Image (tube, grey):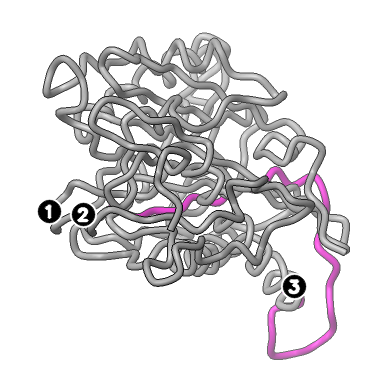
Amino acid sequence: MASTGTLNALTDVAGILVGHYTDTEAVSGVTVVIYPQGAVAGVDVRGSGPCTRETDLLSPQNLIQKIQAVVISGGSVYGLATADGVVQWLARKGLGFPLDDQHVAPIVPAAALYDLGSGRQFVPPINAEWGRQACEAASTGSFSTGCVGAGTGAVSAGIKGGLGTSSLLMESGFTVAALVAVNSHGTIVNPKSGRIWEQRLEIDEEFGTAGQRAVKMPPMPDYRAGRNTTIGIIATDAALSKVHTLKIAQMAHDGMARAIRPAHTMFEGDSIFCLSTGAKKLPEASGSYIDPHALQLSELGHAAADCLSRAIIHGVLSARSMPGMTAFCDLEDL
């Protein structure tokens, strides 16, 4: 029987910290995920309009093996500045790639989504200080979802998007969890039935009564280049290599494509990071011609995809209406 972690959140993976900074007047924000000891990480970018920083470092052939944090921000290209504040915060704590006896270079990949024009100013006053404050707020406990952090100004298929999270305790003993900012052109709702595409993945009635509703969706918005992006982070306590984290990120995209239709379009920057804390070793299977971890990796990837789908649903269900953006909870019944 599938079960969630205690918090049903990314922080069910031991040692992971999550923090937000939210500016409600600017209708934008930033979310940071920190693993102080350094996590092995990979990324898979499927959308054709990405807005990213330091993702090349995560390629398996490149030098860096561990990162200290990942940043998801609003603000489009301007939002990447928030990673500077995260780098500075980590450096002051001595967390990063060692340069000499006194200095480190924190490794902080980042991705941003488009929420411009949602607040008082077309471009929100987003800067490094937002990233620093998100770090100060980070903890290993429960955290807010919906219209917070990177989900503050997010929109999904013409209704309010948001930040969501979920977790899964596998029978093998590993924990897999997801966090996602849903700012998609595609919809989580089947427009014919009015019901959530992937409601079947619900565990222990986690979607509540909202998840059972059939709603009347507004017309699908026209495509507008660069206006949409869904950015996810998968975390697990399974000990993975960079190649393995890349594979898990690739498989997790299946969960995005099932929960949001369409996904990975020419107008979006859909990206998924995968973090491994390395707390639990993978069992090995015998075989001369295959990866000895192949079976477990396949199961982890499947779990990651399901977690991401559930986190996407939570992101939209937990959002509230804001000026010009109607939330799922305020849609008419079909």
Q: What type is the residue that disc 2 sits on?
A: Gly
Q: Which residue is the site of mark 3?
A: 293
Classify 10 Å Cα crowding around label 3: few (below 14), some (14-19), many (20 and above).
some
Classify 10 Å Cα crowding around label 2: few (below 14), some (14-19), many (20 and above).
many
Label 3 secondary element: loop
Q: What type is the residue that disc 1 sits on?
A: Ala
Q: Which residue is the site of mark 1?
A: 225
Query: Magenta residues?
Result: 269-293
Q: Residue at x 84, y 84 (%)?
A: 286
Which label's residue is closer to the chain start, 3 or 2? 2
Residues marked 2 and 1 touching at CB (< 8 Å): yes
Q: What type is the residue that disc 3 sits on?
A: His
Label 1 secondary element: loop
Quarter of the image for residue 262 reads bottom left
Quarter of the image for residue 136 reads top right
The numbered disc on residue 49 is: 2
